[in-house]
């Protein structure tokens, strides 16, 4: 919980430091996803932590309370839930990378789609966010692969 | 079965999505959402301060670098132009004019809008030889007189100020009068008898009777006459100095004075 709060704060600081309108990588969500796939934490609790974090993000940045909250909660349960259905032997670091990349892309696209009616050219910003998220995902993959083999099953 | 449903992450995920959607819809209707956003921003003000300060400093640094680069480019361009002009001047055989002895050039550093036609402050003072009463000129025409003095600055009472009374003479007729301002940008020549019919374009300069000002400093020309009051006809002068573009002035210092 403390680590999740720290990650949210770090993402918030990045958003403050970045130019207005430039979306920063979804550090908080990726961190929760990483924790969720390790199966050391209760996934249901993680979903609600993601929801609360997303809600605060909405209140601080998007101005649309519930949007990021619902998106984070739904996406985390979907990705981590699907992950747990995969046999242990198949849970590789590359698959984790694909899942993280896909989830990150979905969040970016949803943010872009939501702001589409404003007429602003947001797609380059979404692309920038995805590119900025790459190193984080690579770090996640690295961390994942350094664990002892595939994830343990409780 | 019930426990399995409670612990099912899919159920929690869908529930989070539905709650999020409801919140999203409800927040569009309620002003409470705005209050919550304001409260969040207020709550995060200090925790976010390091990032906002960093951003501000980076932005300021970027602007400073941009400005300095532009200034440097402009400076180099102007330097090139000056060199080219010097070459042209040398080729034309024009000799450089040396500063007039007894004159101190000063920049206008302050001109308060509320006292626009009364006074200015210049960046030279007693250290440059300026004294109270020293005449102040622009393009060779009198525009004022030093009224207050500091070491590195001086205040100048402008010719358009009603507080300044300058004995003046008409160069052609040698009629004496007093030049003063109306605090609104006009300069008047007073105490000229009604029967003296002054012509336009007659030049006016300082008179010998002055206590501080040396005689013969050009002031301007007669522009037009006004209504007679008390047997005297005031004349409006077109002064030689351009008070609308008063950026630098020349102050007559002691050795230049008689």
Image: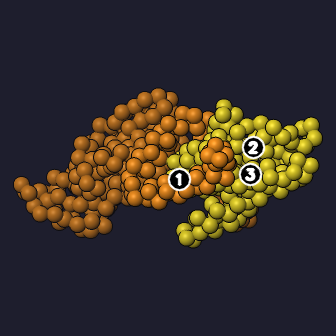
Chain colours: A yellow, B orange
Residue sticking out furthest to the front: B1
Residue sticking out furthest to the left: B230
Q: Is residue B202 left or right of residue A108?
A: left
- Seen in the picture, residue A112 relative to B32 is either above or below; the reply is below
**Nearest-to-viewer mark from 3 and 2:** 3
Residue neighbourhood size for the residue with mark 2, other residues' Cα within 10 Å, grouped as few (<14), some (14–19), many (≥20): many
Residue neighbourhood size for the residue with mark 1, other residues' Cα within 10 Å, grouped as few (<14), some (14–19), many (≥20): some
Q: Which residue is mark 2?
A: A36
Residue closest to the eye, A150 or B217? A150
What chain letter is assigned to the residue under label 2? A
- The image position of residue B85, as x and y in percent, is 69, 62
Tag shown at residue B69: none
Distance of label 1 from label 2 (alpha carbons) = 21 Å
What chain letter is assigned to the residue under label 3? A
Residue B127 visible within the image: yes
Which tag, 3 or 2, sits closer to the chain's start?
Answer: 2
In this rendering, do the residues under marks 3 and 2 share a single chain? yes
Q: Which residue is mark 3?
A: A81
Q: Residue at x 27, y 60 (%)?
A: B237
Residue neighbourhood size for the residue with mark 3, other residues' Cα within 10 Å, grouped as few (<14), some (14–19), many (≥20): some
- Seen in the picture, residue A2 relative to A71 is either above or below; the reply is above
Residue B76 visible within the image: no
Q: Residue at x 59, y 41 (%)?
A: B52
């Amino acid at each position: 919980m403390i680590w999740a709060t720290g990650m949210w704060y770090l993402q918030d600081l990045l958003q403050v430091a970045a130019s207005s309108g430039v979306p920063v990588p979804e550090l908080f969500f990726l961190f929760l996803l990483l924790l969720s796939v390790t199966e050391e934490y209760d996934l249901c609790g993680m979903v609600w932590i993601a929801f609360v974090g997303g809600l605060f993000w909405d209140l601080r940045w998007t101005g649309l309370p519930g949007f990021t909250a619902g998106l984070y909660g739904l996406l985390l349960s979907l990705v981590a839930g699907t992950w747990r259905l995969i046999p242990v032997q198949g849970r590789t670091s590359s698959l984790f990378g694909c899942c993280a990349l896909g989830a990150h892309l979905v969040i970016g696209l949803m943010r872009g789609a939501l702001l589409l009616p404003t007429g602003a050219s947001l797609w380059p910003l979404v692309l920038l966010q995805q590119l900025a998220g790459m190193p984080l995902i690579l770090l996640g993959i690295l961390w994942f692969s350094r664990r002892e083999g595939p994830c343990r099953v409780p | 079965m019930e426990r399995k449903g409670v612990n099912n992450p899919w159920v929690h995920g869908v529930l989070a999505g539905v709650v999020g959607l409801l919140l999203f819809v409800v927040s569009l209707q309620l002003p409470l959402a705005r209050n919550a956003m304001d409260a969040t921003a207020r709550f995060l003000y200090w925790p976010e301060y390091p990032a906002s300060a960093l951003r501000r400093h980076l932005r300021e640094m970027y602007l400073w670098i941009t400005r300095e680069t532009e200034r440097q480019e402009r400076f180099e361009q102007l330097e090139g132009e000056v060199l080219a002009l010097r070459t042209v001047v040398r080729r034309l055989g024009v000799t450089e004019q040396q500063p007039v002895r007894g004159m101190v050039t000063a920049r206008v550093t302050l001109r308060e809008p509320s006292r626009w036609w009364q006074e200015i402050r210049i960046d030279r003072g007693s250290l440059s030889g300026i004294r109270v009463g020293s005449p102040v000129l622009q393009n060779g025409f009198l525009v004022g007189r030093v009224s207050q003095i500091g070491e590195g600055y001086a205040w100048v009472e402008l010719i358009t100020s009603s507080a300044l009374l300058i004995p003046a003479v008409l160069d052609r007729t040698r009629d004496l009068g007093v030049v003063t301002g109306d605090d609104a940008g006009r300069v008047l020549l007073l105490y000229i008898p009604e029967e003296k019919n002054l012509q336009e374009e007659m030049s006016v300069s300082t008179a010998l009777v002055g206590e501080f000002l040396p005689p013969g400093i050009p002031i301007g020309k007669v522009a037009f006459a006004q209504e007679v009051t008390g047997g005297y006809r005031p004349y409006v002068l077109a002064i030689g100095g351009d008070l609308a573009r008063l950026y630098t002035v020349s102050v007559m210092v002691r050795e230049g004075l008689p």
